[in-house]
Amino acid sequence: MKRDMDLIRDLLLAIEDKEETDGNHLFQFDEKDDLGIADHSKEQVNYHLVMLIESGLLKGEESYDRPIISKLTWQGHDFLDYVRDPEIWQKTKDGAKKAGGFSIELLGDLAKGFIKKKIEDHTGIKI
């Protein structure tokens, strides 16, 4: 199965919005609709949730049948803050396509660069 970075971003945004993923609970998504992800199969959603746990963006228990999520990690929150803005996310994806490849770290770094540029343009302060 191919990794879908749009799905990863959508999952992180949905998990951030769930009160049950505050680190004090274990949340098991019974249906993909529990996350508001209607355009992917349950298998795709579960596969990507496991990858997010493996990558350290989520805390949880890996299971391709029913992953269990505890919370976003610090790294998960940082990545999500880098790619939250739809305009920044689109520029990040376009930049990665032009480069011919990407990793989660590269996407985060690229998005961070676009955010720094946006801050510089608005404030005149180079970060």
Image: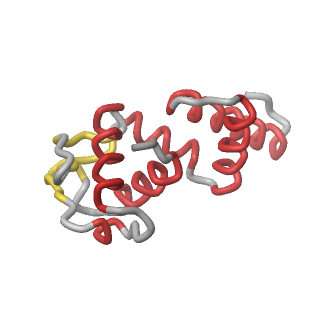
**Residue found at x 67% / y 41%:** 92
* Location of residue 54 in the rendering, given as x and y in whole percent from the top left corner: 30, 32
Considering the image in quadrants, where does the N terminus appear? top left
| 88 with respect to 55 (left or right) | right
The structure residue drawn at horizontal position 64% and vertical position 57%, both measured from the top left corner, is 86
- Count how many numbered circles sit on residues in the image: 0
Query: 126 or 56, which lies in front?
Result: 56
In the visual, does 59 lie left or right of 114? left
Residue 29 appears at what percent x and percent y?
21, 61
Residue at horizontal 41%, vertical 34%?
Answer: 75
Image location of residue 25, percent across then percent down: 14, 54
* 92 relative to 44, above or below: above
Figure check: 100 above or below 76: above
Quick check: 86 above or below 51?
A: below
From what the image shows, is residue 46 above or below residue 60? Answer: below
* Residue 74 x/y as whole percent: 37, 36
Identify the image quadrant of the C terminus: top right
- Quadrant of the image occupied by residue 55: top left
* Left or right, 41 with reference to 8: left
Give 5 or 89, whichever is nearer the viewer.
5
